[in-house]
Amino acid sequence: MSTYSPFITHRFICVLPGKDANEAMNIANCLRQAILSLAIPHSYSSTHSHLTASMGIATTTPEQPLSPDDLLNKADQQLYHAKRRGRNRIEIHERPA
């Protein structure tokens, strides 16, 4: 079961148990596209005329576990990368093989 929850002002967490990085990326891209398709005017933005979504993804596995705090920190770092790289995009934390 997926969980969506407000985390910090203008940020939300989406927990996707049992989803791998590719599945998480596909879900995030569907969310990003759905938000963009609403065409909500965003006159305060210096980068886009309509509301967009930037997202950061981090995953964990039993073989390479991350603590909940580390997982949130990795996702938050990726969110900031997405914002610095132009917004309206998704960045994912790549785990070493």
Image (cartoon, rainbow, N blue to C red):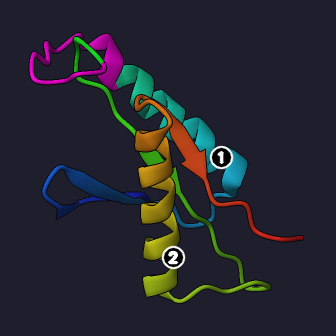
Question: Circle 2 — which element?
Answer: helix
Q: Is residue 89 left or right of residue 44?
A: right
Residue pictured at 23% horizontal, 10% vertical: 39
In the image, residue 21 lies at what x, y percent? 68, 54
> Residue at coordinates 22% horizontally, 11% vertically from top-left?
49
Across and down, in percent, residue 17 comes to 54, 66
Residue indicated by mark 1? 23
On the picture, is 1 further left or further right than 48? Answer: right
Question: Is 60 placed above or below 85 here?
Answer: below
Q: Nearer the viewer, residue 79 or 1?
A: 79
Q: Quadrant of the C terminus?
A: bottom right
Residue type at numbered disc 2: Leu
Disc number at residue 9? none
Q: Describe residue 94's horizontal placement relative to residue 85 as left or right.
A: right
Q: Amino acid at mark 1?
A: Glu
Query: Front-most of 58 and 77?
Result: 77
Quadrant where the N terminus sits is: bottom left
Q: Are marks 1 and 2 in contact (CB under 8 Å)?
A: no
Which residue is denoted by mark 2 in the rendering? 71
Q: Is residue 44 magenta?
A: yes
Q: Nearer the viewer, residue 15 or 48?
A: 48
Q: Nearer the viewer, mark 1 or mark 2?
A: 2
Magenta span of residues: 35-47
Residue at screen point 42% across, 63% down: 76
In the rendered image, residue 79, in percent from the top left (x then y), is placed at 43, 52
Q: Is residue 60 above or below residue 57?
A: below
